[in-house]
Image: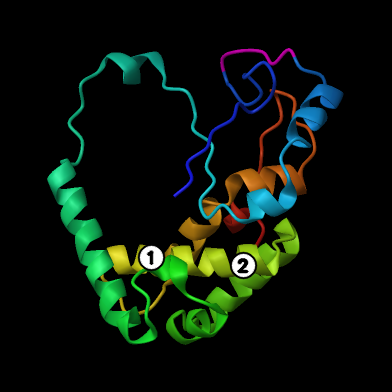
Amino acid sequence: MLVASMNPCPCGYLFDPDRICRCNSMQINKYYMKISGPILDRIDIQVEVKPLKPIQVVENKPSEPSSIIRARVSRAREIQQERLLKHGMTLNAMMNTELIKRYCDLDKKIKEILYNAVKYYKLTARSYFKTLKVARTIADLEQRDRIVEEDVLEALSYREVENILYKKTHYSNKQKKNPGIINVI
């Protein structure tokens, strides 16, 4: 498993709603060009982590207990093992193209959403299949036999960094980025 992080720009404030980015377009483009497309293409989940608001830092809201999350993840892994054991695999991440096509059966509307995402975000075949594997995992976490539209939209939202890099070049703090594929369809 690889976990990596980076700032949104050299100064770190490109998408920050409360701070001004000091970087110019050339600095930002140079910064992003350090990330190899083929490397980024191989990362299954890419998300922007926004800074917490002051109230979020100090409030003590209860969150979902780790034991409940652990149980949900354990059940999803069991589902995957049951599905894939006959193929010598245990996790959706290990599925090849043939198995993805078999276990990620999609209806017409979901195929249209994915087609639009591939076209709009210029997703590679690798990114497309990674999105399907993530959608299959989301469905497993919800204990659904079939992938539904929400699973695919959520999985596409996890390709956020790739979408930012390849669809857009530079944002000023006043520009709003496309919040998701829903706006494209």
Residue 27 picture location, percent across and down: 81, 22
x 73%, y 45%: residue: 36
Q: Secondary structure at mark 1?
A: helix
Residue 142 appears anywhere in the view: no
Residue at the extreme front:
88
Report the number of discs: 2
| Label located before the other in sequence (2 or 1) | 2
Q: Secondary structure at mark 2?
A: helix
Q: Which residue is mark 2?
A: 128
| Chain part drawn in magenta | 18-22
Compared with 58, 108 (above or below) is below
Q: Is residue 24 left or right of residue 165?
A: right
Residue 58 picture location, percent across and down: 28, 14
Compared with 151, 84 (above or below) is below
Q: Amino acid at mark 1?
A: Thr
Residue 166 picture location, percent across and down: 75, 48
Residue at the extreme right:
26
Residue 175 appears anywhere in the view: yes
x 20%, y 21%: residue: 60
Q: Which residue is mark 1?
A: 137
Q: Amino acid at mark 2?
A: Tyr
Compared with 142, 121 (above or below) is above
Compared with 70, 89 (above or below) is below
Q: Is residue 140 magenta?
A: no
Q: Main secondary structure of the magenta part?
A: loop
Q: Is residue 118 left or right of residue 63?
A: right
Q: How is the image coloured?
A: rainbow
x 65%, y 49%: residue: 40
Given residues 82 and 106, the one toward you in this image is 82
Say which quarter of the image contains residue 62. top left
